[in-house]
Amino acid sequence: MPDGLTTVLYFFVALFPLVLVHELGHFLLAKWGGVRVEEFGIGFPPRAVKLFRFGETDYTLNWLPIGGFVRLSGEDDPTIPGALAAASKRVRTAVLLAGPVFNFLFAALLLGVAAVVWGTPEPVLSDDAVAIVSVQSASPADAAGVLPGDVIVAIDGQPLGTLAPEADPEPGTTAAMQALKDATRGSDGQALALTILRGIEGGQAAMVDAPAALALESAALGGFPAQRVAADAEGFRSDDLVIAPAEVAAGERAPSAGEALAVVRGAVSEAAITVTPSDGLIGIGIQPLTANVSTSLAAAPWYGLRQTWRVMDLMVTGLADMLTGRQATELAGPVGIARMGRQAGEQGMGTLIAFMALLSVNLGVINLLPIPGLDGGRLIFVFLEAVRGRRIEPTREAVVHFVGIALVIGLMLVITAIEVIRPVMLGAP
């Protein structure tokens, strides 16, 4: 399939269920609140076919596979029978909140399913290793030859485990990540010699239960101990490296049958790379070295809800930082979403599901922003009505929402144009 068509396909695959779930939330709460629903459409117009009519609602199938839509009677006109605008403040609030809430619940469902089927990433060697997930173009790390998937285990010949700060690391940062950050910030422009493990399959460890007998031999790499599997065994390949638990990795004891061992696979080699930080940075994205750990069906719902809340918190904090100038503004339009969807899909179904969950939370958060025309903007008018004791003139409110939607569409068109033009100007494919 041509690259462009593949990218477009991933865009529709990732976005279709998220928009449909959002609109389904509005639809169900509108029905609950007695609001007249004129049409529930799967896909965006133009209409392909009217499937059926049930009650006062037409159910349709439309040509553009971008989720769906709900057409409610009188969104801005309370004089229409069964109009949304004529409903009580409680009903309007519930209908408007339902879309974003359904997006959050759908994200929790996706993350819970992914946790059961593909496992959840858990840190391994959080005090001793840092995984590199991205390298900025033209950064010091890029110039030095650092690659995504590399794992840093020592700086200037000192294992990260010995460089861990005495104080607690920054929130969301492991001891090894903090040691690396402190070293780059305090380098004063001096070169740092990084000891890197390269060639780790998938860029992460695997959790494998030890068989009754597993032949291991010492294979210390980069200053931290590891045991190499000497011969193929159940669940293990020769040359796999056992890196945890620490006692097994150090060769202090043999693994017990059924014990979960953290293993890295691939043609793993040690490399020494010299990097000179610029303004205390080397231009890499980092995270702990992780391994996927299976989640039980009973624990999956709570895991999904916790992770959804965590992503929501990070998104709200990120938006606040961008608005206050503490973080560079980064916006993605349809083209950016399509490219990210393709990248996620090419990494496997588990990664695509996680990306869809992230996108679903993003859709919910964005719709709750107090922007006229979006759910959050309409909720502001309901709130003002409650405070003032009377509603704002419906025609004026309708104009405000129309202008808000026009500005949002205009912004998306500008972002899309930038996403299309910039790669061409830079000579990217």
Image (cartoon, rainbow, N blue to C red):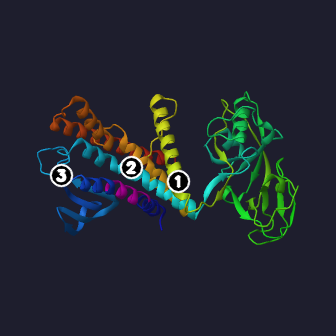
Badge 1 amino acid = Trp
Mark 2 or 1: in front is 1
Q: Residue furthest front?
A: 298
Whole-percent x and y of residue 38?
19, 58
Q: Main secondary structure of the magenta part?
A: helix
Circle on res. 73: 3
Which residue, given by chain and number where applicable, does mark 1 sit on?
A: 302
In the rendered view, would you say 232 is above or below 415? below
Q: Which residues are magenta?
A: 14-23
At mark 3, the secondary structure is loop
251 left or right, relative to 100: right
The residues tagged by marks 2 and 1 sit, at their Cα atoms, a distance apart of 16 Å
Q: Crowding at label 1, few (<14), some or many (≥20) Cα neighbours within 10 Å?
A: some
The residues tagged by marks 3 and 1 sit, at their Cα atoms, a distance apart of 37 Å
Mark 3 or 1: in front is 1
Mark 3 or 2: in front is 2
| Front-lying residue, 228 or 96 | 96
Query: Mark 1 or mark 2, which is nearer the start of the sequence?
Result: 2
Which residue, given by chain and number where applicable, does mark 2 sit on?
A: 101
Quarter where residue 136 is shown: top right
The residues tagged by marks 3 and 2 sit, at their Cα atoms, a distance apart of 22 Å
Whole-percent x and y of residue 332?
44, 45
| Front-lying residue, 352 or 111 | 111
Name the residue: 22% across, 29% down.
388
Is the Cβ of the residue at disc 3 closer than 8 Å to that at disc 2? no
Q: Crowding at label 3, few (<14), some or many (≥20) Cα neighbours within 10 Å?
A: many
Quick check: can you spot residue 224? yes
Query: Mark 2 or mark 3, which is nearer the start of the sequence?
Result: 3
Badge 2 amino acid = Val
Whole-percent x and y of residue 186?
73, 29
The question of residue 42 being in magenta is answered with: no
